[in-house]
Image (spheres, rainbow, N blue to C red):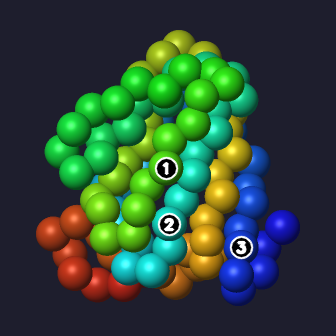
Amino acid sequence: MNTNELSVIQEIMPSGTKEIKHKHSTSQQFFFILKGVATFLIDGEKHKINNNEGIHIQPNIFHQISNETNENLEFIVISQPHSHGDRIIENDGNKNT
């Protein structure tokens, strides 16, 4: 599902990968871990989220998800409103997709 009001996406993150630290100016997000252990860096604080657990990230909070394990990480990310075009990379200040 991907509308202007809501986005629900299932993703697979390979072992040893991470996304760029960023924030969303209007989008809040909820990550639900389906398989594996996700490591989140949220506003400078590290959080480990196990399968069948979730974490909510408010708008304007820098965050980064990474897979520090030896197995694929599977999760669902729900963004409200959708986060496409609402991504600001830390130390950059420019909006990205």
Per the image, the residue denoted by label 1 is 56
What kind of element bears circle 3?
Answer: loop
Per the image, the residue denoted by label 2 is 28
Q: Residue at x 29, y 59 (%)?
A: 62
Say if mark 2 contacts mark 1, CB within 8 Å: yes
Left or right of residue 55: residue 61:
left
* Viewer-proximal residue among 16 and 80: 80
Q: Residue at x 71, y 29 (%)?
A: 34
Image location of residue 85, percent across then percent down: 52, 84
Per the image, the residue denoted by label 3 is 6
Does residue 77 sit above or below 28 in this rendering?
Answer: above
Image location of residue 11, percent across then percent down: 69, 46
Of labels 2 and 1, earlier in sequence is 2
Image location of residue 22, percent across then percent down: 33, 63
Q: Dot 3 surroundings within 10 Å: few (below 14), some, or many (20 or more)?
A: some
Of labels 2 and 3, earlier in sequence is 3
How far, Cα to Cα, is label 3 from label 1?
15 Å
What kind of element bears circle 1?
Answer: strand
Which of the image's four quarters has the N terminus? bottom right
Instruction: Name the residue furthest top.
Output: 70
Residue 57 visible here: yes
Instruction: Name the residue furthest right.
Output: 1
Image location of residue 20, percent across then percent down: 36, 55
What kind of element bears circle 2?
Answer: strand
How far, Cα to Cα, is label 2 from label 1?
8 Å
Q: Amino acid at mark 1?
A: His
Left or right of residue 8: residue 85:
left
